[in-house]
Image (tube, rainbow, N blue to C red):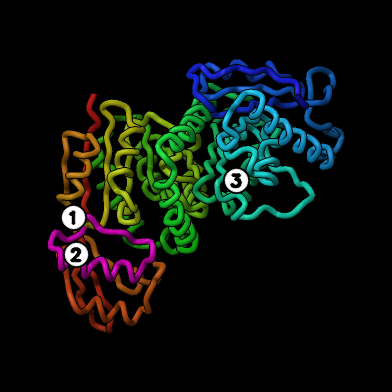
Amino acid sequence: MVLVHRSIPPRVPSERPPLLVLLHGIGADEEDLLPLVPSLDPRFHVVSVRAPHLAEPMGYRWWAIDWSAAPPRADPAEIVASRELLARFLEEAAAAYGTDPARTQLFGFSQGAILSLALLLARPDPARGVVAHSGRLARLPGPEPSVEALSRARALLLHGTEDDVVPVELGRKAGEVLAPLLGTRLEHRELAGLGHGISPESLALAARWLTARLDEEAAGAPAAAAGADHDRALSAAFDDQAARFERAPVQSDPAALARLVAFAGLPPGARLLDAGCGPGLVAEAFLEAGYAVEGVDLSADMVARARARCARFGARASFSQGSLFGLAAGPFDAAVSRFVLHHVEDPLAFLRRQAALLRPGGVLVACDHSGDPDPAAAAWHQEIERARDRTHTRNLPPGELVDLLARAGLEALSLREEPFALDFDEWFDRGSPDRPKAAVRARLLEGRSRSFAPAPQPGGGIRIDSLRVLVRGVKPG
């Protein structure tokens, strides 16, 4: 075979196991990443590969680096040569060890991470998923990667904030480039205080992400694929409206945010998952109350705003762009979502995923614009919501939301309703409308529901008197 390597058969054998390829950094060899294997999913057949060139003063390298340059430089031709060598090796390894070529994953560190991403972008078929730890993107000749070519590719970027070899800014730049190509199939995590190395925390994140890929395959990907179009639409819509959303009175109301924090009733120092974190308004409220927050959102623009808003809280705040279902994190002391459920295609799955990421005794809180239990009133309300926002799914009545928490396995359930008001013009103008504003306005004035009641104002405006529902449950244990 074209590359020297170590082979570790799966600890849980199967007829055509998935292949996981470990790619070391400069100055190391095929033994370097083997200590990771006991922490990785036992279904993988693991091969740990040695780079093809000797490095000075020790180990091996995938390409030479000119350290005298500022910043250090590499010859793109050497990177391309190693990329093609790796692609050939993956084909040989699948044939030699009887693994499934459609389920090959790469785990690269430093130079190995750069090489993994280079292969994913140029030739996504040999490896469908990449964990790139402490890497960056290499500028290489060739056509630009396309969304279509990468439609089945996934990547997890991991980077230490104190990396003095590959600065974290280069990891962030990689995330910015990959986000529009991979959308929700990209997850980007930064490890506070970590230098140029793999920590127990980052290894655990990588292991959970890789296991999630295998579990998705075992469950059958059609359901995930069916939701991918909706996720992409959500990501695009909220990238577009992020600035308007962040300024919206209902979203930024400090009194309502304070009530949400109080309703959660969390113990001091709790670690919280903010599912659908948006621009960080909810996260900021919990951080100001002394909690630690990890946020995730489909929208790259929203995540960038959350990071900027919450930067002053340092390591207590972290945010990643991607899907809740691909999140490799936890367990958390609490999970919260606010004004998210009415954008979710399967709210029960969304709540169950949050519950799965909680420790026993953890708290789940959901807050959303309420729906009406009367079918006719609810249908009128949802018609208007969908006309104003193409990504809207459904506002759940309070009772149904409580039932979903119970079905998600939570107990000690509680519910509270609060009134709030929308200004029609402000609300409509920050949406992603499917119908003209005048048509939606006219339809709004034709009806009312318990949680969505138009009230014409002097001067021609319309106030919409609304209700939001807050529900809370506890994970048994």
The three-letter amino acid code for the residue at tag 1 is Pro
Alpha-carbon span between mark 3 and mark 1: 38 Å
Q: Which residue is mark 1?
A: 397
* Mark closest to the chain's N terminus, 3 or 1: 3
Give x and y (percent) for residue 453: 18, 70
Q: Secondary structure at mark 3?
A: helix
Q: Is the residue under label 1 in contact with that under label 3 (CB below 8 Å)?
A: no
Q: Is residue 477 in the magenta section? A: no
Determine the image quadrant of residue 405. top left
Measure how far apart labels 2 and 1 are at the Cα level.
9 Å
Earlier sequence position, callout 3 versus callout 2: 3
**Labelled pair 2, 1 in contact (Cβ < 8 Å):** yes
**Sequence-earlier tag: 2 or 1:** 2
The residue that label 3 is drawn on is 175
How crowded pointer 2 is (Cα within 10 Å; few <14, some 14-19, many 20+) is rated as: many
Quarter-of-image position of residue 421: bottom left
Q: Is residue 164 above or below residue 128?
A: above
Q: What is the quadrant of the N terminus in the image? A: top right
Relative to residue 133, is residue 410 drawn left or right? left
Name, please, the residue furthest toward the left: 374
- Residue 388 lies left or right of residue 106; in this view the side is left
The magenta span reads 371-397
Q: Where residue 152 appears, x then y in whole percent?
A: 55, 46
Secondary structure of the residue carrying numbered label 1: loop
**Which residue corresponds to the image point at 34% horizontal and 74% vertical from the top-left?**
425
